[in-house]
Image (cartoon, rainbow, N blue to C red):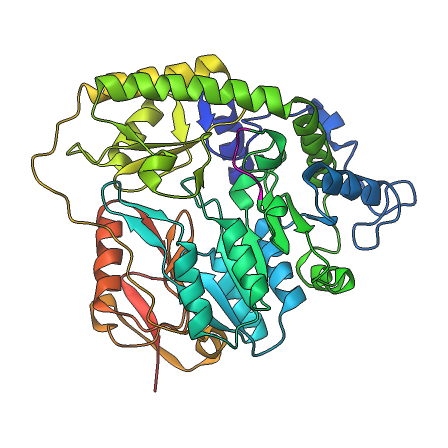
Amino acid sequence: MAAPLYEAMRVFAKKEISSFHMPGHKKGAGIKRLDGRHAFLIDTTELVPTDNLHFPTGCIAKAQEAASRAVGAKETFFSVNGSTAAMETAIFSVCHRGDTIIADRNAHACVISAAILLDLDVAFYQNRFLKDLEIPAPALCSDIIDAMDKNPQAKVVVVTSPNYYGLCADIQSISNEAHHRGLLLIVDEAHGAHFPYCSILPDSAVALGADLVAQSAHKTLSAPTQSAFLHRCSDRVDSIRIRESLHLFLSSSPSYILMAYMDLARDWAEKHGEKAYTNLITVIEKEQMKLEKNTAIRFLTKERGGCHNKDITRVVANFAAYEESAKEIESKLQTYGIYAEMADRDNIVFIVTPANTNREIRVLFRRLFSLSKSLHISMDKKISLQPPKSQGICQPAKAFHAKHKRVPMKDAIGYLSQHTICVYPPNTPVVAAGEKICAEAVLYIEEAQTSGLFVTGIEEGEIDVLID
């Protein structure tokens, strides 16, 4: 095979499937398509008519201004390296070498990457865990206040909201507390780029007092993979510093295809988002209610999450009542051509956007109903897959550059980990680089692997640990 990646993508693209995963355009259904070679007519470079992302003065500047107005930000920057680069840029633009940041335990691994590059200390606050559903939930504002009290030297608070399951933190209260203490607030809103475009969706962090907000245009809007926005929402952050930081993380040859479709995705959402997302939510709520009445499947709601808010378009089906794992059920769905975003042991996460048809959504729920008839109600309580608690402040940069050795995972307890170990997706740390490996972490990793989940930071059952 001369081009294995291309061939694999071409074969998969020909399959008749229902896409309930990112990107939000769902195999192009929600995107203005140009066929054949004409798709590349807009793939260009920095010319006078096409502007320059790193020094925008023309059409790119206008597109970023339109995105800023759409969400109510003071300024918006395009990221062609995803929310990963947007978050790293955000941290770089407000931190100096050696600073301390406060971050949630389920922060994306890019927060650790930024800490390595800037030699930051990271003080974690613990997220809540919903044992009934085996789902991580955002921390309460009181937990973040406690972290602020314990780390008065901190400069920045980082919050992930919504999380991978669509649960939202109380950003307004967190913002008020952070600013009262002189701290800046960065919100990783990668999964909430659609929030500003429909009044019955949760409010965006842009409108709730955050200083910087990163949003992935490809997760819930109809832009291609790797496109994102970074919004400056307050005058506490220096615009020039953001631009300088962006140069460090963005390609010097940014994709005009990505930028053009980010512009189109924003334009479509402004014009049609209110009606489209309202209709989508109506269908989802009706189907969820029907399925809950007739099966033991439960769906994650704002009330069950005990959180500030919940993205209704993020459908999370819980199978804790059954013997079979959600991972097994996800595989069965794929035999029907239905592909979910991810599955852990007890939950399947479906990303639903207006690019999914009502028929697709109804077929999904019908398949879940028919599959439930072949499942077995569990008689025994499953072992909880609760993530381990943070082991205190970690120093990722020190770990990255330290001497290390590789040991079997069971022998790693008590050592500091050189790498960040994550369950993927959603790529959140089980053990952060520079953090002590505890027995609970090893048990969690083993159970996650047994359940079919992918774990990064481990090779052939061994972990790189620091040598004293």
**Residue depicted at 78% across the width and 63% down the height:** 240
Quarter holding residue 178: bottom right
- Secondary structure mainly formed by the magenta segment: loop
Image quadrant in which the C terminus is located: bottom left
Question: Which of these two is toward me, 441 or 339?
Answer: 441
Q: Above or below — where is 396 with respect to 201?
A: below
Query: Is residue 224 toward the left or the right of residue 407 in the image?
Result: right
Measured as percent of width and height from the top left, residue 160 is found at 48, 52
**Residue depicted at 43% across the width and 43% down the height:** 308
- Is residue 105 rendered magenta in the image? no
Measured as percent of width and height from the top left, residue 236 is found at 69, 62
Query: Is residue 73 toward the left or the right of residue 154 in the image?
Result: right
Measured as percent of width and height from the top left, residue 454 is found at 34, 49
Residue 30 seen: no
Question: Which of these two is toward me, 23 or 179?
Answer: 179
Magenta-drawn segment: 200-204
Residue 106 seen: yes
